[in-house]
Amino acid sequence: MRSANVVRETAETRVQVELLLDGVGEARVSTPCSFLNHLLGAFAKHGLFDLRVEAEARIDPDLHHTIEDVAIALGQAFDEALGDRVGISRFGYAIIPMDDSLILVSVDCGGRPYVSVKATFSKTRIGDFDTDMVEHFIRSLANSSRTTIHVLELSGSNDHHKAEAIFKALGVAMKNAIELQPRAGGRVPSQKGVI
Ligand SMILES: [Mn+2]
């Protein structure tokens, strides 16, 4: 079973993440940020991950640290669940529409964190979520999961649709990248022989 259970506790927040990579897309996400709950539900649904997130804000008036710490814990859970990464596809991408919005996400689960987010938002907030936290979430996730993540907005006008399409595309891209390739015969997908 490729799974992990991560608890991250600081003075600011307490976060618990349970992740099953080869799941069916069932999410139980409970954080104080309702739009983050919405985004992570979409991520898990379309990534076919079984995901449970419990987050509590202790000292975090704008939920910045809560969103960041959820991303860090989720990334740690991916890193732990992937283990030595033997037999995975390693690369995955998706181009996902949501009405007006069209978003490309391409990932490399090759052990090296890198982030490029080229997407713009017209508003500073979507509900209880600051739009600059989209990039911050992805950066934190990439660092702690040791993943390269490129996000490119191909078109779009509605901020809610853009953010949701980014998380759906991220889910699908991650699903494809972590898929096991039987033909790889238990090999690590790197010429170095190690990730
Ligand atoms: Mn929505």
Image (cartoon, grey):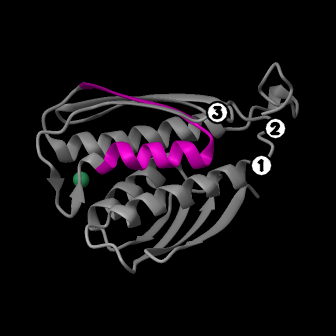
For the C terminus, which image quadrant? top right
- Residue 80, percent from left and from top: 71, 55
User: Residue under circle 1?
Assistant: 83
Point 50% across, 63% down: residue: 26
Mark 2 is surrounded, within 10 Å at the Cα level, by few (under 14), some (14 to 19) or many (20 or more) other residues, namely many
Q: Is mark 3 within 8 Å of ligand 1?
A: no
Amino acid at dot 2: Val
- Residue 31, percent from left and from top: 38, 72
- Residue 88, percent from left and from top: 73, 35
Point 50% across, 28% down: residue: 93
Q: Secondary structure at mark 1?
A: loop
Was residue 84 drawn as part of the magenta stretch in this picture? Answer: no
Q: Is residue 23 above or below residue 95?
A: below
Q: CA distance from mark 3 to mark 2?
A: 16 Å
The mark found on residue 112 in the picture is 3
- Residue 134, percent from left and from top: 33, 46
User: Residue under circle 2?
Assistant: 86
The mark found on residue 7 in the picture is none
Point 43% across, 74% down: residue: 12
Point 15% across, 49% down: residue: 124
Mark 3 is surrounded, within 10 Å at the Cα level, by few (under 14), some (14 to 19) or many (20 or more) other residues, namely some
Amino acid at dot 1: Gly
Q: CA distance from mark 1 to mark 3?
A: 14 Å
- The magenta span reads 133-154
Q: Is residue 128 above or below residue 80?
A: below
The quarter of the displayed image where residue 90 is located: top right
